Amino acid sequence: MKRSNKTIFPFLIPLWFCILLILNVIPIGNDLNKELSGNKILEFRIDYLVHSLTILCFAWLNLVARSRRQMSLKLIPFSLLVLSSAALYELVQCFIPWRSFNPVDMFYGYVGAALAILFVWLDGILHKDARVLSNQSKLELKISLTDSQEIG
């Protein structure tokens, strides 16, 4: 049985939320932890980049759903989701014995959230402008058709 994108997309954002929650509570092991926090790109720790990118994926999922005219979140609910996720994923580690809370990780989660909100906001502006132009073109076409019918 083939599933269509219409049935899959509403579940992708909650699924990504759950995947990230699980990844933030499972023991990742010292080797992987040292590899992520020890490796740097231009003196920038890779684990900070990972925190930003995982939250930024919410924007990609939302924008893909919107572009396919599927269920996507409006800007305010989306903003609440990504901001609370950035905090939750790090705060939950306070209660997990094998994980530790790191405010810098939370900060980079907020960086990813801010970028995600920015991208969804900009996409909303671009689509709003496109809708206005489309409606204006339709109105002009309707007026010209009315004028041509009156003349003819």
Image (spheres, rainbow, N blue to C red):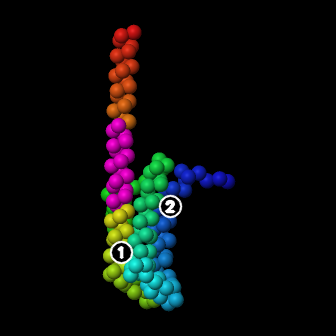
Residue beneath the point at 34% across and 44% down = 128
Task: Please state the total of marks drawn on the protein image.
Answer: 2
- Residue 85 lies in magenta, yes or no? no
* Residue 77 versus residue 89 in the image, above or below: above
Residue 108's label in the rendered image is 1
Quadrant of the image containing the C terminus = top left
Question: Quick one: which residue is furthest to the top in this view?
Answer: 152
Where does the image place residue 28, in percent across and percent down from the top left? 51, 84
The answer to whether residue 79 is above or below residue 105 is above
| Residue extending farthest right | 1
* Above or below 24: residue 17: above
Query: Residue 21 placed where, x, y %?
Result: 45, 74
Give the residue displayed 35% in from the left and 77% down from the top: 106
Per the image, the residue denoted by label 2 is 12
Q: Earlier in the sequence, mark 2 or mark 1?
A: 2
Was residue 129 drawn as part of the magenta stretch in this picture? yes
Which amino acid type corresponds to the residue marked 2 in the rendered image? Answer: Leu
Q: Which mark is residue 123?
A: none
- Mark 1 crowd level (few <14, some 14–19, many ≥20, 10 Å Cα): many
Q: Could you tell me which residue is drawn at 40 percent across and 71 percent down?
A: 52
Looking at the image, which residue is at 32% across and 76% down?
Answer: 107
